[in-house]
Image: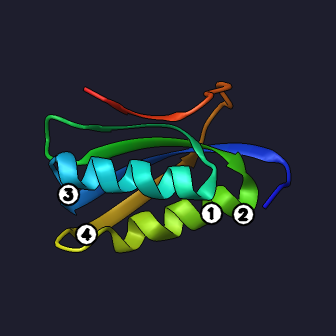
């Protein structure tokens, strides 16, 4: 989509723990052209760092609010983050 590069960090809570949410997030981020990472947190939530064009990052945030099929997203906290220059979107462990 193009535009100014921006970065956000998301904290996604609800029934989201597991490889399926991480893999689906990675797939959606790659489809949108967003770079960064996703990882499971010990409390069962998921952390996401996303960077790219504003519209693409906004689209990923909106997708995270819905979540993939089978997830029950309760809340998504979003805050601005520093752009780290990630070249791809990765699952972190």
Residue 52: where, in percent of width, then height? 69, 46
The residue positioned farthest toward the right in the image shown: 3
The C terminus lies in quadrant: top left
Q: Is mark 4 on a helix, strand or loop?
A: strand
Q: Which mark is residue 16?
A: 3
Is the residue marked by circle 1 packed among few (<14), some (14-19), or many (20+) residues within 10 Å?
Answer: some
Q: Camera-side residue: 4 or 78?
A: 4
In the figure, 86 relative to 2: above or below? above
Instruction: Tell me if label 4 and label 2 are in contact, CB under 8 Å.
Output: no
Instruction: Tell me if label 1 and label 3 are in contact, CB under 8 Å.
Output: no
- The residue where tag 4 is placed is 74
Question: Mark 4 or mark 1, which has the lower sequence index?
Answer: 1
- The residue where tag 1 is placed is 58
**What whole-number distance in Å separates the C-alpha atoms at marks 4 and 2?**
23 Å
Residue 49: where, in percent of width, then height? 49, 39
Question: Mark 1 or mark 3, which has the lower sequence index?
Answer: 3
**What whole-number distance in Å separates the C-alpha atoms at marks 1 and 3?**
20 Å
| Left or right: residue 11 compared with residue 57 | left
Identified at 35% across, 42% down, the residue is 47
| Left or right: residue 66 compared with residue 86 | left
Dividing the picture into quadrants, the one containing residue 43 is top left
Q: Is mark 2 on a helix, strand or loop?
A: helix
- The residue where tag 2 is placed is 55
**What whole-number distance in Å separates the C-alpha atoms at marks 4 and 1?**
18 Å
Is the residue marked by circle 2 packed among few (<14), some (14-19), or many (20+) residues within 10 Å?
Answer: some
Instruction: Single out the mark in the foreground, 4 or 1.
Output: 1
Identified at 46% across, 68% down, the residue is 63
| Left or right: residue 91 compared with residue 59 | left
Identified at 63% across, 50% down, the residue is 33
């Amino acid at each position: 989509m193009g535009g100014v590069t921006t970065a956000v960090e998301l904290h996604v809570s609800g029934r989201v723990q597991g490889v399926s949410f991480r893999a689906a997030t990675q797939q959606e981020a790659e489809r949108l052209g967003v770079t960064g990472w996703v990882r499971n947190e010990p409390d069962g939530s998921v952390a996401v760092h996303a960077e790219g064009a504003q519209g693409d990052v906004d689209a990923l945030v909106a997708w995270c609010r819905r979540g993939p099929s089978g997830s029950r997203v309760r809340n998504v906290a979003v805050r601005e983050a520093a752009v780290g220059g990630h070249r791809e979107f990765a699952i972190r462990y």
